[in-house]
Amino acid sequence: MFFGSKKFKFVLRLPVKCVTMTEKIIRFGVSIEPDLLKKYDKIIKKEGYNNRSEAIRDLIRKNLISEKSKDPNEIVIGTLTMIYNHHVATLTDRLLDLQHEHTKEILVTTHVHIDHRNCLEVLVLSGKIGKIQKLADKIKALKGIKHGELVITKICL
């Protein structure tokens, strides 16, 4: 990916260490109470799944990501989404300072002016989960941050 003007050019490179291969599908049975299955079917239909298999695969992937995220050295990607009041004294300066201190973890930022006081900002992050979590916690704790949420995922499971 290429960013910049004639004067400055930036190349964004995301390391991908996994190789995708065509995998064999394994069928297995699941025993479940009828009422629980009925509730689950209702949810997956509402979420747009075409079948139970894909919904169950997504649950398994989510669980694997959650488990891997417990290791502070695990390499992950993610986003930190936050809403804040930019009129709070020194908040924007503190946000910029933190972002400049973490250029290795922050790939891209997006800033949207919601109204006269409020901004939405999204940081796209990559690196060790421990460092990313600490950065997100520092940012979310700043006075003036109304809401912040870190979402972590993996390229490969």
Image (cartoon, rainbow, N blue to C red):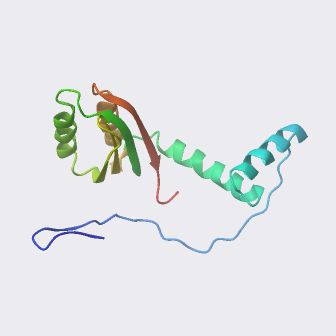
**Looking at the image, which residue is at 40% across and 48% down?**
79
Q: Residue furthest front?
A: 116
Q: Is residue 8 left or right of residue 39?
A: left
Who is closer to the viewer here, 27 or 122? 122
Residue 117 vs 4, above or below: the answer is above
Q: Residue at x 69, y 71 (%)?
A: 24
Q: Quadrant of residue 102?
A: top left
| Residue sitting at the far right | 34
Q: Which x, y percent locates residue 101?
A: 18, 43
When asked about the image quadrant of residue 141, the answer is: top left
Rendered-image quadrant of the N terminus: bottom left
Total marks shown come to 0
In this rendering, is residue 61 above or below 142?
A: below
- Please indicate, yes or no, whether residue 145 appears anywhere in the rendered image: yes
Residue 27 image position (x, y, % from top left): 79, 62
In terms of depth relative to the viewer, which is nearer, 1 or 25?
Answer: 1
Image x and y of residue 130, in percent = 35, 39
Q: Quadrant of residue 135?
A: top left
Residue at image position (16%, 39%) is 97
Toward the viewer: 35 or 64?
Answer: 35
Q: Position of residue 153 (x, y in %)?
A: 47, 51
Can you see residue 74?
no
